Amino acid sequence: MNFKTVDEIRQAIAPVAESMGVEIVDLEWKLGADPALTVFIETEDGVDLDTCAAFNNAVDPVLEEFDPTFGVPYTLNISSPGLDRPFKTERDFARNIGSDVEIKLYAPIRGKKFLEGTLADFDESSVTIETPQGMQKLERSKIAKINKAIGI
């Protein structure tokens, strides 16, 4: 099956998202017998069911006209990315400066593959966190996942 790319779909629905104050965090195709497109969204105030329903109703006619599957039936899912979603965009990092974060590394650094701290700074190649042991700068290429720490 030949489907349009997530980048093409993002461009098609971006004006709707912008008009509603919604950030498109990610898009995902599930291919197979029952294809599904999931659009993960975020707003400044968070995402609830009403937000998902309103966004679904707004983008559905746009996607109907855009026809991302060239006529093949598919399911459209609109979802929050979840509290523990990984930071993917520069905006994710910027909005979480000063927040407690969890970092999983590809390989241990000083014997640790998991770090916790407060996000102090970032740039395109590194992340700096404040830990009880002091500031620690990590190369982003060594980070498997960074997300907001979820209190239990």
Image: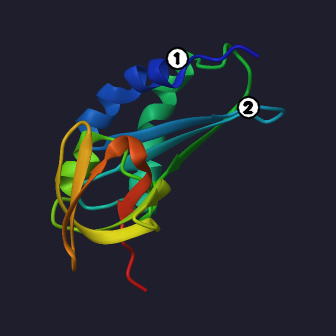
Towards the viewer: 106 or 1: 106
Relative to 14, is 124 above or below?
A: below
Tell me if mark 2 has few (under 14), some (14-19) or many (20+) residues whose alpha carbon lies within 10 angstroms of its own: few
| Number of marks drawn | 2
Furthest-bottom residue in this view: 152
Q: Which residue is mark 1?
A: 65
Q: Which mark is residue 42?
A: none
The percent coordinates of residue 84 (x first, y second) are 44, 64
Towards the viewer: 144 or 97: 144
Tell me if mark 1 has few (under 14), some (14-19) or many (20+) residues whose alpha carbon lies within 10 angstroms of its own: few
The percent coordinates of residue 18 (x first, y second) are 25, 34
Dot 2 amino acid type: Leu
Dot 1 amino acid type: Glu
- The residue sitting at 40% across, 27% down in the picture is 13
Q: Is residue 65 visible?
A: yes
- The residue sitting at 41% across, 65% down in the picture is 83
The percent coordinates of residue 132 (x first, y second) are 21, 80
Tell me the quarter of the picture where residue 19 sits: top left
Furthest-front residue in this view: 110
Q: Is residue 21 visible?
A: no
Relative to 30, is 95 above or below?
A: below
CA distance separating discs 1 and 2: 21 Å
Left or right: 141 with respect to 137?
A: right
Tell me the quarter of the picture where residue 123 sits: top left
Tell me the quarter of the picture where residue 58 sits: top left
Q: Secondary structure at mark 1?
A: helix
Relative to 111, is 63 above or below?
A: above
Quadrant in the picture for the N terminus:
top right
Towards the viewer: 5 or 133: 133
Q: Which mark is residue 31?
A: 2
